[in-house]
Image: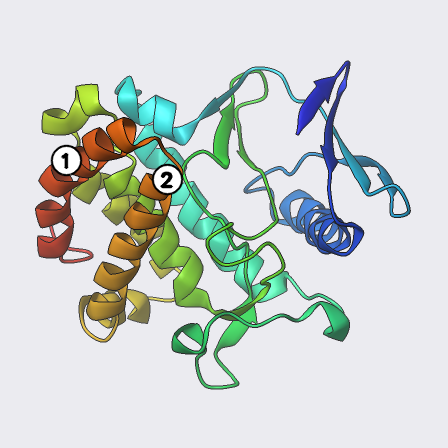
Amino acid sequence: MEIVGEIIRKTGEPGTLAIEAAKASMAFDIGKSCGLFYVPKIVNFDVKKGVLEFERLYDLVTLLDMAARKDERLFELLKKAGQALAVVHEKLVLPEEMKHELPAEWMASPGENVFIHGDFAGFNLCYDESTDRLVILDWSSAPLLGRNVTYGSRFFDIIWLVIFIFYGAPRRCLFNWDAQGMANAFLSGYAECHPEIIQRLSGDFQPLMRRYYRKTVWYLAKQRSWYKAARYLLHQFMIYPRFARYNPGHG
């Protein structure tokens, strides 16, 4: 990804970019219709060259950065993120040829599967300070899964952000990081449409949540040099017990 004047340019495999373009375009319309969030407009997609360009938004701050600086608007924005994700799961529909399933453990019964964001994490959730709106970026799926995954249990997106809220704690905030409060704020927003998610996260999904936390941390550690990986794993070793004890929806 690169910044070129007033645009953000992505280059890559045309098929992968086509999926991201389709998701982002539909999500733009969903966000405009519900008023809960904004997605940057696509200004150009050259499928032959593998180039996808979005409008550039200024004055964006990630929700992770807002958490690190203890911004008082954070919890309301996390609740709005939950509300927004619930709407995305209800409204996002892609062509059949773009339906690529999550790993089998994330597939629900046929009536429960939805099209997903795929990388619903704190650095893809932003606050636009100039327009006072939630902005959702990067509609390709997480590298851990492969960039083309689009379909599966709604709980993947939900759990992905809950996991991120814990492992994303900056080192300087390690001992003053209200991950539980942040996760509960997000879940409260989603639960307005689907109140059953709290109970299911507290029961059936606990083992999967913990397994994917460890899997994600190990994946991220391998992207670092051995020295930085060691420091990162030590940091996570101190955070993980909090996550393992986390009971969704409880104070």
Q: Amino acid at mark 1?
A: Leu
Is 112 situated left or right of 58 in this image? Answer: left
State whether residue 73 appears in this view. Answer: no
Residue sitting at x 35%, y 23%: 66
Instruction: Tell me the residue that label 2 is attached to.
Output: 78
**Image coordinates for residue 118, horizontal then vertical, percent:** 52, 55
Depth check, front residue: 89 or 62: 62
Is 41 situated left or right of 111 in this image? Answer: right
Residue sitting at x 8%, y 48%: 241
Taking the view exactly as shown, the residue that stands out farthest to the front is: 226
**Image coordinates for residue 142, horizontal then vertical, percent:** 50, 50
Residue sitting at x 55%, y 57%: 146
Is 15 situated left or right of 238 in this image? Answer: right
State whether residue 92 appears in this view. Answer: yes
Density class for disc 1 (Cα within 10 Å; few <14, some 14-19, many ≥20) is: few
- Tell me where residue 7 sits by quadrant: top right
Name the mark on residue 234.
1
- At mark 1, the secondary structure is helix
**Image coordinates for residue 138, horizontal then vertical, percent:** 59, 41
Name the mark on residue 157.
none
